[in-house]
Amino acid sequence: MDSFWDWFWLLVWWFVFFMYLVLLFQIIGDLFRDRSLGGWGKALWVVGLIFLPFLTALIYIIARGHGMAERQMAQLKETQAATDAYIRQTAQTSPASAIADAKKLHDQGVISAEEFAQLKAKALA
């Protein structure tokens, strides 16, 4: 490793290897995310990735690349929806606003005095 070009090509090959690993993990993640593909199909793809990794990765991207993007977007939307639901669930309003809302419902006759008392006790707890 005495010349600049030796170092340059080493850097290029490390970059190509890193890209291959990222692609390999994306393919394996997509295989196990896909619910329409059976266990034997997944096993065949994994065996292909072990014995003929570059060819199998290329074939997988060509054959299933479009579905790969759709499954990843569906996973992202599902994760975002779960995160939003968790935030809505844990983000509580102040006790004063909860009591005010319960009072409005009680004044409108939607809830009884007992239900209002329960809501008030829950908000103050």
Image (spheres, rainbow, N blue to C red):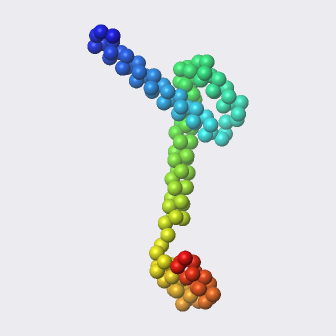
Q: Quadrant of the C terminus?
A: bottom right
Does residue 83 lie above or below 119 as drawn? above
- Residue at the farthest front position: 125
27 versus 119 height, above or below: above
Asked whether residue 14 appears in the rendered view, the answer is yes
Percent position (x, y) of residue 26? 53, 33
Query: Residue at (57%, 81%) from the top-left corner?
Result: 121
Residue at the spot 45% in from the left edge and 26% down from the top edge: 18
Please tell me in which quadrant of the rendered image residue 49 appears.
Answer: top right
Query: Which x, y percent locates residue 8?
Result: 32, 17
Q: What's the residue at 53%, 20% (across, down)?
A: 54
Is residue 95 shown left or right of residue 11?
A: right
Name the residue at 56% across, 88% down.
106
Instruction: Identify the residue at the far left of this view.
Output: 4
Asked if residue 110 is positioned above or below residue 72 in the image, the reply reads below
Q: Position of residue 24 (x, y in %)?
A: 53, 28
- Of the pair 70 and 115, the residue shown nearer to us: 115
In the drawing, does residue 117 fall left or right of residue 95? right
Query: Which residue extends farthest top?
Result: 2
Would residue 64 be visible to someone looking at this image? no
